[in-house]
Image (spheres, rainbow, N blue to C red):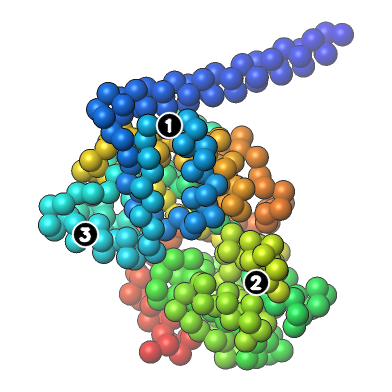
Amino acid sequence: MRRFAGMAGALAALCMLATGARAQDDAFAADLYKKARAAKESKVSFYTSMVPAQFAAIQPLWAKRYPDIQIEHVRADLGQTLERVLAESRAKKYLADVISNNESSYPVLQQQNLLAKFDSPSRQKWIEPFKSAFNGVQFPSRVLQIGLAVNTNKLKEAEYPRTWKELGDSKWKNRLGIPDPRVGGGAQLWFLTMWDKPEFGEKLLSAIAANNPLIKPGIIQVQQSVELGEIDVDVVAYDYVTIPARAAGKPVQFVLPRDGTILFATYDSVATNAPNPNAARLLVHFLMSKDGQEALASAYVTPVHSEAAINPNGSQLKGTPVLSTAPSDEQVKKLKTYVGHMNRVLGLR
């Protein structure tokens, strides 16, 4: 009886902790919303690469909670977003409130002092390694899994490659596609990870290159080549691109390699010169909250908030090793050297 009483007490304590954390998050959001309304901040300008399906997932919940503040969704890829923010900064026209960035654009934005320090109580509930790696600026609101996309018309399930190492087999000659890793993003992180992991390394990358992969500028172009049957396997696929495509009837399937995945994050940051600073902080806090992460999970994002429900139709990690989540400082410093490796091994010009 005492044992059960002790268990009940422990469960009650856990519930109180969870309730307390949620109350703290809600109070933090309420305070920011109050300040935004007092300052007459009626919109928040979101410079982002967030795809329409993800924005459609969060917008109704935001509008219900904060009807007085409209999200201005200014969408472009992260390279274009960086150029726009830099151009506006040179002209002293600060229009962005929240700026999406990644490991490639972040150093440039930070060097120009365009991103502000901010923290949210929800950070205590983030999964690792994102929680301990937080730098006070970047909030990993959209995390995806990198794996393989296969054409289901050309391959039977038993024929799907299940590991990265299999892609070096000569049977995949002229059947693979890779986004150009020099462009940045997930393809670049994939190359850096493969190169530096001793179980893969230059040997595997050279074997993949010997299979004459189709190389296109970006993730979407290679995904489309798989859908059209131009190639059988996309070597660097994003789960939140491939899984919705399959749901829409495209002949593709996302495969999570057994020998590891890469969790690739797109970050959101408050702009230093945000015209609507309270609304900017409110949006970032909202995106990282349990409810915000669950809304994004419905669009196949891997939630960073530990209490957010995972989409049952999405890719499930289920103990799959995580090979990396971001370039190391050393990799960033040596990026020109890695680009040289890309050119040499993949035969890029």
Q: Disc 1 marks which residue?
A: 66
Q: Which amino acid does label 2 sit on?
A: Ala
Q: How many numbered discs, if any? A: 3
Q: Residues within 10 Å of mark 3 (few under 14, many from 20)?
A: some
The residues bearing labels 3 and 1 have C-alpha atoms spaced at a distance of 30 Å
Give the structural element (helix, strand or loop) at label 3.
helix
Q: Mark 3 points at which residue?
A: 86
- Where residue 200 sits, quadrant-wise, is bottom right
Using the numbered discs, state the Cα–Cα distance from disc 2 to disc 1 in whole angstroms: 38 Å
**Residue labelled with disc 2:** 149
Give the x, y percent position of residue 344.
43, 87
Say if 109 sits above or below 132 in the image: below
Residue at 55% across, 39% down: 305
Q: What is the x, y in percent for residue 300?
A: 61, 53
| Closer to the camera in the image, 170 or 39 | 39
Q: In which quarter of the image is the C terminus?
A: bottom left
**Mark with earlier residue (3, 1):** 1
- Where residue 55 appears, x then y in whole percent? 49, 50
Residue 97 in view (yes/no): yes
- Marks 2/3 in contact by CB < 8 Å: the verdict is no
Residue situated furthest left in the rendering: 91
Earlier residue among tags 2 and 1: 1
Is residue 165 or residue 122 the one in the foreground?
122
**Residue occupying image coordinates x 67% and y 47%:** 311
Packing grade of label 1 (10 A; few <14, some 14-19, many >=20) is some
